[in-house]
Amino acid sequence: MLILIDYFSNKELSSYFPNSVNFEFEIENSDFTFIQRFNTLFEQRAQLVSENIRLEQEVQDLRSLEIVNQELQLQLESYEAISTVSNIQNFELLSSGFITKNLNLEYLIYGGTNQQLEVGDLVINEKGFVVGYLREVFYSYSILESPYSSDFNLEVMDKYNNTYLITSNGSEMFISSILLDNYKDDIDFLYTDISFNHSGKFPVVDTRLINFEFQNNQINASVKFLDSFTFNTKLFIPKFK
């Protein structure tokens, strides 16, 4: 009986009795039935504990699967958004993301020579827009030259083959025309182009909300940053297949 009580009292009761004490009493048939019932309770309790452990593990596994599923869904949505870019099927999209911002206010992103990345490779976001290019490439990370850098400069082209230069002062971008042979008001977007040694044609700026100043066959405009970088921003480096 003491053993039974110990089971439910964490052995607190038996600690009060010395080891030399012997308990002698007669056990009747009804006592055996009582003990058997307790044995059954012990077995049921052990089964419940085991079942609870199993259920807790299943819940943890389901939570892990849910997180993985959410990540895959977000990645799929990103690829679906990029798929609207012309000829995107001709490129392998290497997934990347922000690591940190160093003391020089430079953005470090995942991927380097271990993925055959090179200086000048374009970096696009999940909408397919160019957010910069690789300025320096190391083994497992690279430095992104983004519009938030005053050293940023990128030659671009519109759909009528007019060319422009995009620069930045770190807080806004400046667009200046280089050559205007066939300028029209409906240029819509400015793109990168292989003629500038870019990997392909990707949108950089949506000009439909920009007020251009046209003077002496020269176009100029300033553009405030609409999208800010966060460490959750998904980045891709397109490499021609």
Image: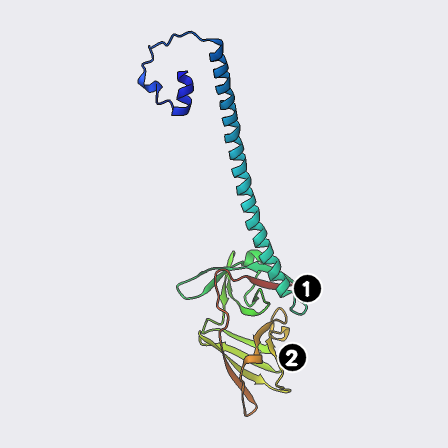
* Image quadrant where residue 87 sits: bottom right
Q: Which mark is residue 143?
A: none
Q: Position of residue 172 (x, y in %)?
A: 47, 76
Residue 205 higher or lower than 91, as above or below: below
The answer to which of marks 2 and 1 sits earlier in the sequence is 1
Percent of width and height locating residue 7: 42, 22
Mark 1 packing: few (<14 Cα in 10 Å), some, or many (20+)?
few
152 versus 179 height, above or below: above
Quadrant placement of the C terminus: bottom right
Question: In front here: 198 or 230?
Answer: 230
Could you say where residue 103 lies in the image, as x and y percent from the top left? Answer: 39, 63
Locate residue 5, reporting x and y percent: 40, 20
Mark 2 = which residue?
Answer: 159
Given residues 12 and 134, the one toward you in this image is: 12
Residue visible at 48% across and 68% down? Answer: 228
Q: Residue beneath label 1, please?
A: 89
Q: Is residue 235 above or below residue 149?
A: above
**Amino acid under disc 2:** Lys
Q: Secondary structure at mark 2?
A: loop
Q: Give the residue drawn at x 56%, y 70%.
A: 130
The reply to whether residue 138 is in sight is no
164 on left or right of 103: right
Residue neighbourhood size for the residue with mark 2, other residues' Cα within 10 Å, grouped as few (<14), some (14–19), many (≥20) = some
Does the image show residue 200?
A: yes
Q: Residue at x 49, y 68 (%)?
A: 145
Cα–Cα gap, marks 2 and 1? 20 Å
Quarter of the rendering occupied by the N terminus: top left
Residue type highlighted by circle 1: Gln
Residue ranking furthest to the bottom: 216
Query: Which structural element holds mark 1?
Result: helix
